[in-house]
Amino acid sequence: MSVRQRLYEGKAKILYTTDDPDVLLSYFKDDATAFNAQKRGTIQGKGAVNCAITAHLFRLLEEQGIPTHFIDQSSDREMQVRSVKILPLEVVVRNIAAGSLCQQTGLALGTVLNQPLVEFYYKNDALGDPLLTRDRLLLLELATPDQLDELRSRALQINQVLTDFFQQCDITLVDFKLEFGLDKHQRLILADEISPDTCRLWNQAETDPDRRVMDKDRFRRDLGDVESAYQQVLKKIRSPKQ
Ligand code: TMP
Ligand code: ASP
């Protein structure tokens, strides 16, 4: 499959067209940003690690009957994906209070939620990706009411699969962000990536609140050892307990 032209460059990935109009190539960069790109840096080897982790998790979700845009991993930092129209929504699922949930509600870091919380953020850098209410989301026509219900149930289903899987890897899935797209038949498909850039992952072998962090919070909060934490996630997901 030959690569044609750069379609879109985001903060962590570049999308290229291919000679098949239904297939795009997603290239994972080492670039890291946080706080709406106010903080920028490089995490050496991140592209390859996140590409491998995303491929692994998308295969797992496909096996569980959840449609994703993933087709195949074509090199260490590239994957072939189905072309979809991305909905301008960030769907966040939380199992444990952390990050903006703590900052905005006063809940203590680490509070276990009685049930998973699903939130929708407007994927709009100029506005700083604000948290949406259901009515605002519908007002802006970012999704239909049926799509919203489907996004919510799909997100919860994905949370169940991923929580169980990470548990087998001695990792706690604290929260994560998903993006969905519509294919040419208007079917909702999981897209983008699932990696330590887009999840909070805590190492169950560590009790110290900073040492247990295996995700982009190490970069956001200058905790150090970012590269090795990402590598460790990949190592752990490759050898789950059964
Ligand atoms: P938050 O606590 O900062 O709202 O983040 C919730 C989850 O979403 C966390 O796992 C990190 C992820 N996330 C992204 O993937 N991209 C983003 O731009 C933000 C703000 C969060
Ligand atoms: N990815 C987002 C950004 O660069 C924010 C984050 O992940 O913290 O702005």
Image: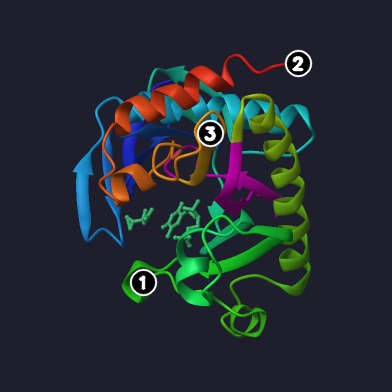
Q: Foreground residue, 90 or 146?
A: 90
Q: Is residue 194 magenta?
A: yes
Disc nearest the viewer among 2 and 1 = 2
Residue where numbered disc 1 is placed? 128
**Mark 3: secondary structure:** strand
Q: Residue at x 79, y 35 (%)?
A: 65
User: For the residue with label 3, is its CB less than 8 Å from the closest atom of ligand 1?
Assistant: no
Residue 132 colored magenta? no
Q: Which residue shows up at 30% across the image and 55% down it?
A: 34
Q: Residues within 10 Å of mark 2 (few under 14, many from 20)?
A: few
Residue type, mark 3 in image: Val
Where is residue 132? Give x, y as percent. Answer: 56, 77
The answer for how far apart the CA atoms under marks 2 and 1 are is 41 Å
Describe residue 137's horizontal placement relative to residue 26 as left or right: right
Amino acid type shown at disc 1: Gly
Distance, label 2 to label 3, CA atoms, is 30 Å
Where disc 1 sits, the SS reads: loop
Judge whether residue 194 can be spotted in this image.
Answer: no
Whole-percent x and y of residue 195? 48, 37
Confirm whether residue 125 shows in the render. yes
Residue 182, numbered circle: none
Between marks 1 and 3 in the image, the one whose residue lies nearer the viewer: 1
Quarter placement of the N terminus: top left
In the rendered structure, which segment of residues is drawn in magenta? 172-197
Residue marked by disc 2: 242
Residue marked by disc 3: 81
Give the vertical position of 26 relative to 186 (above or below): above
Q: Residue at x 31, y 28 (%)?
A: 227
Could you say which quadrant of the image residue 72 lies in? Answer: top right
